[in-house]
Every structure is written in structure tokens, then in C-alpha cells.
Image (cartoon, rainbow, N blue to C red):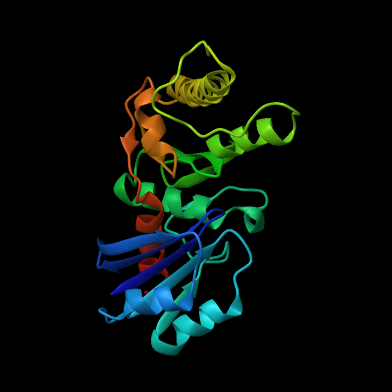
Amino acid sequence: MNLIVDIGNSSTKIAVYDGGKKITDFRSKEFSCEKLEKTLAPYKIDKAILSSVKETPDYIYDLLSVSIPFVHILTYKSKFPFKIEYETPETLGTDRIAAVAGAHKLFPHTDLLVIDAGTAMTFDFMSGSIYKGGNISPGVVMRFKALNKFTNQLPLVSPTVNYSSPGQNTKDAIIAGVITGVSYEINEYIRTFEKKHIEFKIILTGGDSKYLKDKIDFQVIYMPDIVTDGLNYILEYNAK
């Protein structure tokens, strides 16, 4: 079985795969040895992959390598089943690499736009078996925090399902402004992508994707597990 450890900006996701099938997973704001050991207890883990978008404590690798025969740390030097055309691959987030890997596994000969609505919102482009690069912009929560931090009077709010648009009060004005802006941004990316590609797939993932998916005017494939699926794919590819 395979262990997937994905350390993101806001939380850590841990998953166990048997072949290509996910057996279990959980997400935690704070990573701990106790939680990891509890997750591993029922399973015989043969391989593991560690992906992190920030500095990873040494104890995590030490903990994994003690009991798992093959442990792979994902970096730009890892082997990939596609070509990466990126001028600074050493700065390319491992979460972005994993997301396009998961999409590529499902649609290996298709042009892809992978939208990850997380702490930062990323738009990554695949053309067949070539990763062409992507764009990064602030995510939903980051936009709410920015409005609060860089103004004197605007409150910190969170997205809700029900709000007036145009906003009839300051809270709704902020929510409507952020969510409408994000929705317009996503829709325009897809519209522009559609003009340049005849056959393509749009993959939507990330922590805010469930909230945003009904606000997109185009057909998208909602895949909340695409990053861990991609990490499992990369793990198998590097273990060959």
C-alpha cells in the first residue's frame, strides 16, 4: 500500500492508496507524529511520497523512513510521465505538479486546464504530455483577509451560501465582491482557453472548489482528490 503525505499552506492531507484506489484519508490543520502513526496502524505501507509547499521538518522524513521501505520526496528533480516546460522548475509548487499529474493520468492525450482553488488559486495548462506553465492569483480566503488587513473599517468575513448581490450591507458587499470576482476570473480563463483548444478538459479542485463549482458557467470535472491521486501516480512512476 502507498502512503501520501501532502503538506499544504493551510493544512496537511494524508491518504492511503491500494494500487490506484484510495482507501482512506484525512486532513488536519496541525501535522503530528501521533496522527500519522494512528493512520498507519491498520495498514502495511510499502511506499510513501511526501509533498510539501513549505519547509518540512526532518522528523517527518525520519518517521516515514523508519518503517517504510521506499520513501520519495517530491521535487522538481523527480521523474514525471510528462515534460515540464517551466523556466524555473525549482520554484514550481509540488502541489501544482501533483494536480497536473493526476489530470494527465486520467486524460493523457488531452489538453487540460487544471484549476486549484486553494489558499492561492492556480491555473495550470497541459498540452498533451507537456506541462506548459500556469498562473497564480489570491484564493478566496486570502482576498477576504486582504480586504480586512489593508483597510481600516472592512470586517473579516467568510463566504456563505446566502448573500445579496449587489450587497445590501457591508458584509454582503464584501462576499459578493470577492465571490463574483473569483467566478468571473475562472470563467474568463476557461473562455480564453476554449478559444485556443478544440478538445480539452477542465479540472476543478482545491479547498474552495466545492463552494465555487456551481458558480462556473462551463462544464468542469470536479475532482477534490486530484492532488493525492497525482502524488500516488508520481510515487508509482518513481518506484519503478
In the figure, is residue 194 to the left or right of 181? left
* Residue 63 horizontal/vertical position (percent): 48, 83
* Residue 36 horizontal/vertical position (percent): 41, 75
Q: Residue at x 32, y 38 (%)?
A: 222
Above or below, 22 against 161 in this view is: below
The answer to which of 110 and 3 lies nearer the viewer is 3
Above or below, 57 against 14 in this view is: below
* Residue 194 horizontal/vertical position (percent): 43, 22
Above or below, 126 against 154 in this view is: below
Above or below, 109 against 58 in this view is: above
Specify the quadrant that holds the N terminus: bottom left
The answer to which of 93 and 106 lies nearer the viewer is 93
- Whether residue 111 is visible, yes or no, is no
Specify the quadrant that holds the C terminus: bottom left
The answer to which of 17 and 235 lies nearer the viewer is 17
* Residue 209 horizontal/vertical position (percent): 41, 38
Q: Residue furthest bottom?
A: 66
Q: Residue at x 41, y 31 (%)?
A: 212
